[in-house]
């Protein structure tokens, strides 16, 4: 279970006059995501969705609040006052987010993250990309924590042998429909295939949680729908195997959020805070034209319209 409690994120930025000023990206966000669910974070650009997702992943430390996964702290908030800095330095020897992972117990969180721009290595084949992730998994297990590239060290998991690494990589490439493209480079793959490669690489480390930041935004509408269905198929396979993956998805697409999710979390315009939490109880498999899904989409669009125009044209 993912538990976010009172998460805030403050940045210091330089304005056009060269003066430092504050920017609050996320403000007092509390959210619980049960195991095995798909939850979408939806909202206008600049509302802090991606920042919040990176805090969930441990890629950023919150200014205030805490993220716990299965009861374990992901990263401590960074010190905000001189007194906190002194205590932090005494505890970790230097002030850095890295101190959370170097001078304390490594968090044992099985997390994979998929980015909008695929984040695959162009000089590696599809197979080599997945193999690389699995080698990082092995390194994470050896250290007992999260690897430098965010691949998880599984608590109680066994390290894979070289032969097993390639077998698993080929297995997940096949799951993603890329078996015949295993030896192709990303430049030889379409945008949709590159995103399926990113999905295969994430699934190969067998995480408990996948965090996705606008994963389908760079492809055309038809490919996007195919990738959504592919994601649901793979997610349902993990559920059928008794180990359902938890997915948290950042998107701007209202239809995508409603079609995929068990719950849609609507963020307010910046600073980002939770505006509404809308459960989606329609049974799976779903049709995009289902009347219940369309009604939820219309409700969410009305919320956005209200925030833009400051006038309600729908009963919320």
Image (tube, rainbow, N blue to C red):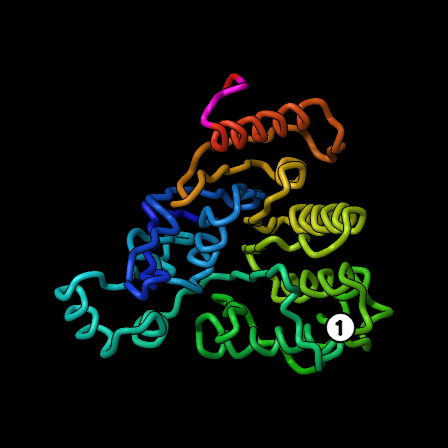
Question: Where does the image place residue 182, in percent across and percent down from the top left?
Answer: 80, 73
From the viewer's perspective, tell me whether residue 221 is left or right of residue 272.
right
- Secondary structure under the numbered disc 1 in the rendered image: helix
* Residue for badge 1: 186
Q: Residues within 10 Å of mark 1 (few under 14, many from 20)?
A: many
Residue drawn at point x = 77 percent, y = 51 percent: 220
Predominant secondary structure, magenta span: loop
Question: Where does the image place residue 296, in percent across and percent down from the top left?
Answer: 61, 27
Task: Examine the rendered structure and indicate whether residue 286 appears above or below residue 177.
Answer: above
Residue drawn at point x = 63 percent, y = 48 percent: 242
State the residue in front, 249 or 233: 249
Give the residue furthest to the top.
Answer: 315
Question: Where does the image place residue 236, in percent across and percent down from the top left?
Answer: 69, 46
User: What is the quadrant of residue 108 in the picture?
Assistant: bottom left
Residue drawn at point x = 17 percent, y = 74 percent: 90
Q: Tag count in the figure?
A: 1
Residue 208 lies in the magenta stretch: no
Residues in magenta, as a range: 310-314
Residue drawn at point x = 61 percent, y = 62 percent: 206
From the viewer's perspective, tell me whether residue 43 is left or right of residue 131.
left
Question: Where does the image place residue 273, in percent across and percent down from the top left?
Answer: 40, 41
| Residue 1 visible in the shown view | no
User: What is the quadrant of residue 119 in the picture?
Assistant: bottom right
Give the residue furthest to the front.
Answer: 17
Task: Examine the rendered structure and indicate whether residue 60 appears above or below residue 228.
Answer: below
Give the residue furthest to the left.
Answer: 83
| Residue 265 visible in the shown view | yes
State the residue in front, 164 or 31: 31
From the viewer's perspective, tell me whether residue 216 is left or right of residue 274.
right
């Amino acid at each position: 279970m993912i538990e976010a409690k009172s998460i805030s994120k403050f940045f210091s930025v330089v304005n056009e006059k060269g003066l430092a000023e504050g920017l609050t990206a996320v403000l007092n966000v509390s959210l619980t995501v049960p195991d095995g669910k798909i939850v979408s974070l939806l909202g206008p650009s600049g509302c802090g969705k991606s920042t919040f997702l990176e805090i969930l992943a441990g890629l950023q430390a919150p200014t205030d609040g805490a993220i716990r996964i299965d009861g374990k702290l992901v990263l401590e908030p960074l010190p905000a006052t001189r007194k906190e800095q002194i205590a932090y330095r005494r505890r970790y020897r230097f002030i850095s987010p890295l101190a959370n992972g170097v001078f304390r117990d490594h968090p044992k969180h099985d997390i994979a993250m998929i980015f909008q721009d695929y984040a695959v290595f162009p000089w590696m084949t599809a197979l080599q990309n997945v193999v690389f992730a699995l080698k990082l998994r092995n390194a994470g297990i050896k250290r007992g924590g999260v690897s430098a590239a965010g691949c998880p060290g599984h608590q109680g998991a066994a390290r894979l042998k070289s032969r097993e690494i390639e077998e698993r990589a080929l297995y997940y490439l096949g799951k993603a429909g890329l078996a015949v493209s295993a030896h192709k480079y990303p430049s030889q793959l379409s945008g949709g295939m590159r995103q399926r490669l990113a999905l295969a690489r994430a699934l190969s480390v067998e995480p408990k949680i996948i965090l996705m930041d606008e994963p389908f935004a760079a492809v055309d509408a038809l490919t996007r729908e195919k990738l959504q269905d592919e994601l649901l198929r793979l997610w349902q396979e993990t559920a059928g195997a008794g180990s359902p993956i938890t997915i948290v998805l950042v998107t701007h697409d209202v239809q995508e959020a409603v079609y995929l999710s068990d719950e849609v979390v609507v963020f307010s315009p910046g600073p980002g805070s939770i505006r509404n939490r809308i459960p989606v109880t329609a049974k799976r498999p779903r049709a995009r034209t289902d009347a219940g899904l369309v009604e939820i989409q219309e409700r969410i669009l009305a919320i956005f319209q209200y925030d833009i125009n400051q006038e309600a044209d729908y009963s919320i």
